[in-house]
Every structure is written in structure tokens, then in C-alpha cells.
Image (tube, helix red, strand yellow):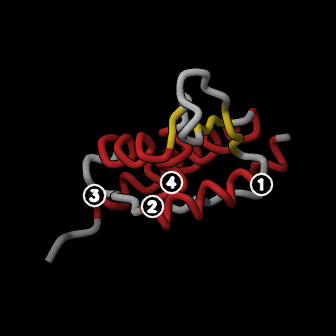
């Protein structure tokens, strides 16, 4: 499954935050709120962007609809095992990028 998960990388910033948000079952509006909070306001998702991404991720098997007994009006989503692997691989990729370039960035002088 790791090879399959690697095919999704690199993720867009919005997709990465959506997957992070799905660390627990959430509906669309809650995902939008969580993404804004976790990204410290750097990423704000509109409904079109969010639901387009959710539909694509669901078709790819990265997320799936979750059943929530108390609320039949909203669609809830959760990560699949593939989705959990994808988000962990992307985290490791980003972490490696920063670690590998840390010293070089220090050498680059600002004008």
C-alpha cells in the first residue's frame, strides 16, 4: 500500500490540511473551520473547493463517508487506511524538505 500512497504525493496545501482535519470524523463545515484553525488562518476553504476535493479524495479511496447516528442531514467523512498513510508520508516528505534545506537557508542572505 505504501507504493500506492506515494502516487498521491506531493499533496496541495489545501488537500494536506483537509486530510489533517479528518484525524477525526467531521462534516464539511467542521472541516472548513478546522483547516482555518490548524493552518492559523493561512488556508480558508470555500464550499466549492472543499466539496470538489472531498469528492475526488473519496473516489480515490483516500477518504470515505462515515455514518453518524445523530445527524442524518450532513455528510461526514473519515480517513481510510490509505488516507492515513498518505498524510503521514506527506508529513515526512515536508519534514525532510525542511530538514535538508535548513542550513542552506541560513546561508542565503536577505536583501
Q: Which mark is residue 106?
A: 3
Q: Quadrant of residue 80?
A: top right
Residue that appears at 71% across and 57% down: 8
Q: Which tag, 4 or 2, sits closer to the chain's start?
A: 2
Image spot of residue 50 (x, y percent): 50, 58
User: Which residue, given by chain and number where applicable, does mark 2 sit on?
Assistant: 47
Contact (Cβ within 8 Å) of mark 2 with mark 3: no
Q: Quadrant of the N terminus?
A: top right
User: Which residue, given by chain and number where applicable, does mark 4 sit on?
Assistant: 97
The kind of secondary structure element at disc 3 is: helix
Contact (Cβ within 8 Å) of mark 4 with mark 1: no
Q: CA distance from mark 4 to mark 1?
A: 26 Å
Q: Which tag, 3 or 4, sits closer to the chain's start?
A: 4
Closer to us: 43 or 47: 47
Residue that appears at 61% across and 39% down: 77
Q: Which of the two marks, 2 or 3, is nearer to us in this view?
A: 2
Q: CA distance from mark 4 to mark 2?
A: 31 Å
Q: Quadrant of residue 30?
A: top left
Contact (Cβ within 8 Å) of mark 3 with mark 4: no
Q: Which of the two marks, 3 or 4, is nearer to us in this view?
A: 4
Closer to us: 99 or 59: 59
Q: CA distance from mark 2 to mark 3?
A: 39 Å
Q: CA distance from mark 2 to mark 1?
A: 20 Å
Residue that appears at 52% across and 51% down: 16
Amino acid at each position: 500500500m505504501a507504493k500506492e500512497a506515494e502516487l498521491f504525493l506531493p499533496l496541495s496545501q489545501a488537500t494536506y490540511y483537509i486530510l489533517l482535519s479528518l484525524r477525526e470524523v467531521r462534516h464539511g463545515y467542521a472541516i472548513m473551520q478546522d483547516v482555518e484553525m490548524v493552518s492559523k488562518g493561512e488556508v480558508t476553504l470555500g464550499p466549492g473547493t472543499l466539496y470538489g476535493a472531498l469528492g475526488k479524495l473519496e473516489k480515490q479511496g483516500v477518504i470515505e463517508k462515515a455514518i453518524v447516528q445523530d445527524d442524518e442531514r450532513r455528510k461526514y467523512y473519515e480517513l481510510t487506511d490509505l488516507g492515513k498513510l498518505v498524510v503521514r508520508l506527506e508529513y515526512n516528505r515536508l519534514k525532510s524538505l525542511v530538514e535538508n534545506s535548513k542550513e542552506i537557508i541560513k546561508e542565503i542572505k536577505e536583501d
